[in-house]
Amino acid sequence: MDNTTTYYFVGIKGSGMSSLALILHDKGYKVAGSDITQYTFTQRGLEQAKIPVYPFDEANIHEGLTVIAGNSFTDDHPEIKKARDMGLPVYRYHEFLGKLIEGYTSIGVAGAHGKTSTTGLLSHVLSGIAPTSYLIGDGTGKGTPNARFFVYEADEYRRHFLATKPDYAIMTNIDFDHPDYYKDINDVFTAFQTFANQVTKGIFAWGDDENLRRLKSDVPIYYYGTGDKDDFQARNIKRTTKGSQFDVYYHDEFLGNYHVPLFGEHNVLNTLAVIAVAYFEEVDLDAIKDEILSFKGVKRRFAERKVADMTIIDDYAHHPSEIRATLDAARQKYPDKKVIAVFQPHTFSRVIALMDDFAKALNNADQVYLTDIFSSARESNGKVSSADLAKKINKGGEILKLDNMSPLLDYHDAVVVFMGAGDVQKYERAYEELLSHLSLKNN
């Protein structure tokens, strides 16, 4: 690390990039960056830290910068190209992260789903016990002086997590995703197997995942879950409208009764993984109980608000497994209300590869609405549309347009879950505005 340089982030509003920028800022380094001018949910933290954010422009690049390039941008990006032409140090995001975690007790959280929620919970819990730096994939990052732990989200996309070699890894699941890069589930498995080979102390893996059970490693693999063969087990689970409560055992050793103010079976499992890590790092488990109770969740994961008589939930779910988990959580918290799903499909390749699974997962709602497919920077078009997915949905499937969200006004005292990894929040805002005007008129 260099105190004389400015660390300049190309694509600083990216969820991992903004987290990394905040960590370096906390550590006292000079930080700046560039991105699109459109507002994103990650930029508030950058604004609060007073980190300069400029519109993309190669004129931003000058002597004295160390450039960290976001993985969404190729080497042809004007700023990255100019930095390389000038001979400035240029790192890819994952390469820089791999260097940054050295010297700490590092814990990487990997998995097709559940990374951000688990990283957030683990960061929150350990921060209450010992100095902890963390990088969460919701744009949250903290660089703590003299940190004992470094918790980070380990992203499998394009095998980026292989740039890191953590002491511990939590692996929540192995599932087929990112069909624009991975060929099939075995291709995904080989990436996780390689990552497992790089872990230096221990792996905590979900026991019900058959692919995680196939892993081989020179370090111990501890499985967590609800089954008899799991090393760490959640027993006597009680799920209520206030959260979930359960007993935790390590083999036959009782580790206590825990309550987590989160919803859905996946959050019981995420909490179990966090407890397992704490146990092996000999952290006071009673203190862990208290920290779990005060966790408020992470951005864009089951984020709730009330408008008029409606409950609106915003969630990043963009894979069938995530949709199922989010709807399961909504049913747990609101068992007596109708649950309406509004889903923005994310990338054409993912919709083509997983269309039948999307339909099955969405049919867990009482009524389903779709928006047009969100085209990413990597895929601007494709040979599929939301109308193709709608034909496979039994519970509706009407396609909403931003200038007409009125079909949602037919529901009262219900739950509307907006899901997607693109810009689904603009549909949510349009609906909230309609609701607000309607309630003002009624008053």
Image (cartoon, rainbow, N blue to C red):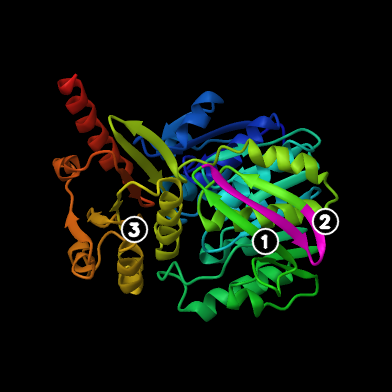
Task: Estimate the spatial distance between the alpha carbons at disc 3 and disc 2, rounded to whole Å.
Answer: 38 Å
Give the quarter of the image for residue 349. bottom left
Residue position for label 3: 346
Quote the CA–CA distance across marks 1 and 3.
Answer: 36 Å
Please rate how many residues cluster around mark 1, counting C-alpha atoms within 10 Å: few if below 14, some from 14 to 19, many from 20: some
Residue type for callout 2? Phe
In primary-sequence order, the first of circles 1 and 3 is 1
Q: Which amino acid does label 1 sit on?
A: Arg
Magenta part of the chain: 242-255
Which mark is nearer the camera, 3 or 2? 2
Disc 3 packing (10 Å; few <14; some 14–19; many ≥20) = many
Q: Is residue 319 visible?
A: yes
Q: Name the residue under label 1.
A: 235
Residue at which label 2 appears: 280
- Residue positioned 47% across, 45% down in the render: 14
> What is the three-letter code of the residue carrying label 3?
His
Q: Residues within 10 Å of mark 2 (few under 14, many from 20)?
A: few
Residue with the most extreme right position? 282
Looking at the rendered image, the quarter that the C terminus falls into is: top left
- Label 3: element kind: loop
